Image (cartoon, rainbow, N blue to C red):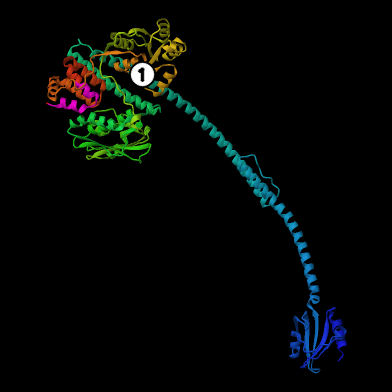
Amino acid sequence: MRLAYIDALIRNKTGLGETAETYLVADSKKGAIFISRESKENIDFQGKISSVGIERAIERQDGFGLYDNYAGIPVVGVYRWLPKQELALLAEISQKEAFAPARQLARNILIIGLFCAGVLLVGINLLSRQIVRPILAISEAAEALAAGDLSQTAPVMTENEVGLLAQTFNQMAGQLKALVEDLEKRVQERTSELEFAKEKAEVANQAKSAFIANMSHELRSPLNAILGFAEIMTRSQTLPKEHLENVSIISRSGEHLLNLINNVLDLSKIEAGRITLNHKNFDLYRLLNDIEDMLHLKAQEKDLQLLVERTNDVPQYICTDEVKLRQVLINIINNAIKFTSDGGISLRVAQKSPPSHSSKILFEVEDTGAGIAPEEVDKLFEAFTQTETGKQAQEGTGLGLPISRKFVQLMGGDIHVTSQVNQGTIFTFEIEATVVTESEVVESKIPQRRIIALEPNQPRYRILIVDDKPLNRQLLIKLLSPLGFELKEAVNGQQAIEIWDDWQPHLIWMDMRMPVMDGYEATQKIKATTKGQATTIIALTASVLEEEKVVVLSAGCDDFMRKPFREADILNKMGEYLGVRYVYEEKEIKLKEKEETVESIEQKVRVLSEELKQQLKDALLTGNLAGIAYIIAKISQSDNSLAEMIQKYCDSFEYEKVLNWLSDE
């Protein structure tokens, strides 16, 4: 067998490369092998050789495959068993050489693929720009439109769907611009209308404020004269007893009228937003006791029980508007007494919030009265409106509860009502208050004895009275002249300046509203001079507006007093600023030094006329301090010791004892 011929034939026909070899293998126990002499001529194999191709060929199999040859080199081989020769013919080439063209082809394909991909990407990018650019332009226009640039439009770059979208967007932008311009025009019109309405409201509010001020001045000024002259007349030692009683009636009626006027003015101030809180440190426990003392006998007259209860955690010393809180409680409890015929009234006080510097205090007034129909509950807080029960009672103006509710709201709470007809009513409200210490509470001490003269060895105090109303000037002259003050009067600010410059008074009582020159201008001109600084100027005004006090003080006045005033208030102010020392009607006598047995007091009270006792009882039940003073003054004319005893108990708010004396038969 010519192996070289076979090898050459195989190489030529198959194109085998340099690593190809052809060899014959005999199935011999010694493993004798014939190998192509061109490639393996000088190699002599000793022993048996083996590979996958050799093993399969010797096993009489024909085929091809990838395997490691007898030398361990990865090859692509073809093997065939030659039965006639009893030999296996194998032709092999290394895998590296065999697959070299395939690898080259793969590299070429990869290079071509990458090149094509790059070209494709460039094309896609260029194409996407053509597609995306109009969309981006629309998006930018939309963003500008959203930012408020209503003049922004989108460019129409194509005639396809994107171009149609741009055209539609521009139409929408135009419509939106028109709508916004129309809306701005309407807003501008409404704003102008609102500004005009606001100006009208401000003018109306100013007119209302002016009305309040005028009402205050025009109503309180004559009341000042009525109450003031009534107080002077009660001091008369020559006035017959029946005339004193008539004066007392005038005084009580004036006080009642003043209370009604104050209610109306309070409501007007509330509606105008001109009312404010006057915070004060006070003893809440004492306030509750005073109210109980004041109203207890009034409840007893109707055989009703009045209970005042409070929990232990209620703070004793607080800071809020004491006057308004007192007024609210008296209004609600008075209503409860008025509309309750059987049972009683309970005032319960508790702390709603945990103890701290700021506290919420809960008040609850419950009665067993006629109750209120559900449909009438809302009417309770409407000004000048009364329920059917209130109309039947034919009492009141319908202002107490509306004002009380506004006061409570000012103090940080609200009033709530629950009621059942024929079972009773519960009024509940809460207020916010600051907790203070006992040392922060200053109790006012008002002299309780009547002043009858000036102490000797004092300067002759010059007092200038400035008021355009003759009655108001005459009232002050009647009050001050008997005590020994040197007085002059002026009818306007200009005349006051002339008298002040020539006479140099120690103190000026200055009315603030006058013709020619008002009190503000006159005060400013006086206080602008060096010698004017030494003159005390106290404003007398009928205004009820709290901010009026700030205006008056900023004009240069040293202090501020409202009309109507009491004699004691006038004299106390003069003592405060001038150091005036007074002679009182009688030296203060301690209770131990002048004791009266209960029996003797009751006997003396029985001697009083029924009308006088009823007047004193009414004054005590309503807390009318001026009325109490008038009645005591009348009693002193016939029994000075009894008057002093009643005065002492009233000064310590022991009204119940006095009322017990008056009620005993």
Q: Residue 639, position in %: x, y? A: 16, 16
How many numbered badges does the structure rendering display?
A: 1
550 relative to 474 in the view: left or right? right
Which part of the image, by quadrant, shows the N terminus?
bottom right
Helix, strand, or loop for circle 1?
Answer: strand
Residue drawn at x 65%, y 45% as measured from the top left: 140
Q: Nearer the viewer, residue 9 or 288?
A: 288
347 relative to 42 in the view: left or right? left
The residue indicated by pointer 1 is: 561
Q: Is residue 403 visible?
A: no
Q: Nearer the viewer, residue 262 or 201?
A: 262
What's under tag 1, amino acid-wise? Met
Question: What's the magenta bit mostly, secondary-structure-wise?
Answer: helix
626 relative to 148 in the view: left or right? left
99 relative to 657 in the view: left or right? right
Q: Residue 119, position in %: x, y? A: 77, 59
Residue drawn at x 71%, y 54% as measured from the top left: 128
Q: Which residues are magenta?
A: 645-664
For residue 663, what is the image quadrant? Answer: top left
Farthest residue, direction top: 502
**Does the magenta portion include 651?**
yes
Farthest residue, direction front: 593
Residue drawn at x 44%, y 10% as measured from the top left: 531
Q: Nearer the viewer, residue 344 or 190?
A: 344
Relative height, residue 399 to residue 492 (above, below): below
Relative height, residue 625 to residue 143 (above, below): above
Callout 1 crowding tier (Cα within 10 Å): few <14, some 14–19, many ≥20: some
Q: Residue 640, position in %: x, y? A: 18, 16
Which part of the image, by quadrant, shows the C terminus?
top left
Q: Is residue 305 visible?
A: yes
